[in-house]
Image (tube, grey):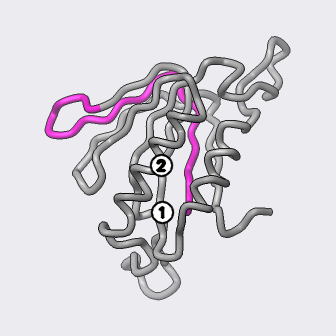
Amino acid sequence: MRLLVQRVNEASVKIDTQINGEINQGLLLFLGIGEDDHQEDIDWLIQKVVGLRIFSDEHGKMNLSSSDVDAEFLVISQFTLHASTKKGNRPSYIKAAKPGQAIPLYESFIKQLKSAQNQKVASGIFGTDMKVSLINDGPVTIWIDSKNKQ
């Protein structure tokens, strides 16, 4: 599983011109589910993302976690995080999980994040055309891959 984390002042997702989810200060999470991903990947990613100390303390140092600042979360499914650009100029998405496998994992990720945090967790809708708006804070953007736990 691949997760692109963006610290935001605010973010929202529109589907067919209607806002489906929006947050204030928090984390925008783009979640890419691969064909070899399982529940263990979710468990590890949730623990990692809620523990990330990427919010500034009173000295301006990134030392606080999402729990410390009552951060909100917006989760967006993003199969293109599994793009392979190894050959040619057209990305291949062959490593991205098919909807039958990905949807339950996406929903499980959201449910588990809600359980881990007492803050708002909003989301897009898997497989739809979404328009995501954000005001990146910092900017702070972090890449996490559950298959590369270095």
Label drawn at residue 59: none
- Residue 130 image point, x, y percent: 27, 45
Q: Is residue 76 left or right of residue 58?
A: left
Badge 2 density bin: few <14, some 14–19, many ≥20, Cα 10 Å: many
Query: What's the residue type where badge 1 is placed?
Result: Leu
Q: Which secondary structure lies at badge 1?
A: helix
Q: Which secondary structure lies at badge 2?
A: strand
| Disc 1/disc 2 C-alpha distance (Å) | 8 Å
Q: Which residue is mark 2?
A: 30
Q: Contact (CB < 8 A) between labels 1 and 2?
A: yes
Q: Which residues are magenta?
A: 1-20
The image quarter in which residue 92 lies: bottom left
The residue positioned 48% from the left and 53% from the top of the image is 31
Q: Is residue 24 left or right of residue 142?
A: left
Residue furthest to the top in view is: 58
- Residue 53 image point, x, y percent: 76, 33
- Residue 37 image point, x, y percent: 53, 69
Query: What's the residue type where badge 2 is placed?
Result: Phe
> Image height check: is 92 above or below 9?
below
Residue furthest to the left in view is: 16
- Residue 60 image point, x, y percent: 80, 19
What secondary structure is the stretch in magenta mostly built from? strand
> Image height check: is 121 above or below 91?
above
Q: Which residue is mark 1?
A: 81
Front residue of 114/77: it is 114
The residue positioned 68% from the left and 45% from the top of the image is 47
Residue furthest to the bottom in view is: 87
Q: In the image, is residue 147 part of the stretch drawn in magenta?
A: no
Q: In the image, is residue 6 part of the stretch drawn in magenta?
A: yes
The residue positioned 26% from the left and 32% from the top of the image is 20
> Image height check: is 100 above or below 65?
below
